[in-house]
Image (cartoon, rainbow, N blue to C red):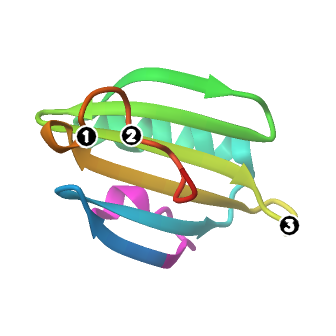
């Protein structure tokens, strides 16, 4: 798990290898908007290009590209105040079969 996906105070609750990359669930001590700001900076600093973004307030998504990899970061409101759950899915684009990766493990 690259450290850029783990802000201070984050708890990695699940991680697995998938399609040449990884899928992870992370609890962060940031609200959705603060987490979105963190991930925009972190992925930019990590060399990822944001190719699509969506922000609905209660959840937000970033779709990314870096070399042969595509990624999705989904930030959702948690049941705990000022905390969020983040799903990160990084895949080898050649193994994806077209389109963008799903941001959450249920899809």
**Which residue does the image show at 78% across and 62% down from the upper left?**
78
Q: Earlier in the sequence, mark 2 or mark 3?
A: 3
Q: Give the x, y percent position of residue 1.
A: 29, 68
First to last magenta residue range: 1-13
**Which residue does the image show at 52% across and 59% down from the upper left?**
105
Q: Secondary structure at mark 1?
A: helix
**Which residue does the image show at 65% across and 36% down from the upper left?**
60
* 54 is higher (above) or lower (below) than 12: above
Is 2 situated left or right of 82 in this image?
left
What residue would you read off at disc 2? Answer: 101
Q: Extreme front residue here? A: 97
Circles 3 and 1: CB atoms closer than 8 Å: no
Q: Earlier in the sequence, mark 2 or mark 1?
A: 1
Q: Give the x, y percent position of residue 71.
A: 34, 41
Residue 27 visible somewhere in the drawing: yes
What residue would you read off at disc 3? Answer: 79
Is 96 situated left or right of 32 in this image?
left
Front position among marks 2 and 3:
2
Q: Extreme top residue here? A: 51
Inter-mark Cα distance, 2 to 3: 26 Å
Residue 1 visible somewhere in the drawing: no
What residue would you read off at disc 1? Answer: 96
Inter-mark Cα distance, 2 to 1: 7 Å
Circles 2 and 3: CB atoms closer than 8 Å: no
Q: Secondary structure at mark 3?
A: loop
Q: Residues within 10 Å of mark 1 (few under 14, many from 20)?
A: some
* 41 is higher (above) or lower (below) than 26: above
Quadrant of the rendered image containing residue 79? bottom right
* Camera-nearest residue between 25 and 8: 25
Residue 7 drawn in magenta: yes
* Camera-nearest residue between 78 and 107: 107
Q: Give the x, y percent position of residue 52.
A: 46, 20
């Amino acid at each position: 798990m690259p450290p850029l996906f783990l802000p201070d105070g984050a708890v990695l609750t699940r991680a697995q290898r998938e399609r040449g990359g990884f899928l992870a669930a992370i609890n962060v001590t940031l609200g959705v908007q603060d987490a979105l700001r963190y991930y925009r900076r972190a992925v930019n600093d990590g060399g990822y290009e944001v190719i699509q973004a969506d922000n609905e307030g209660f959840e937000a998504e970033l779709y990314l590209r870096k070399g042969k990899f595509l990624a999705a970061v989904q930030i959702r409101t948690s049941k705990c105040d000022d905390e969020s759950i983040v799903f990160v899915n990084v895949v080898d684009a050649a193994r994806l079969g077209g389109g963008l990766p799903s941001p959450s493990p249920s899809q």
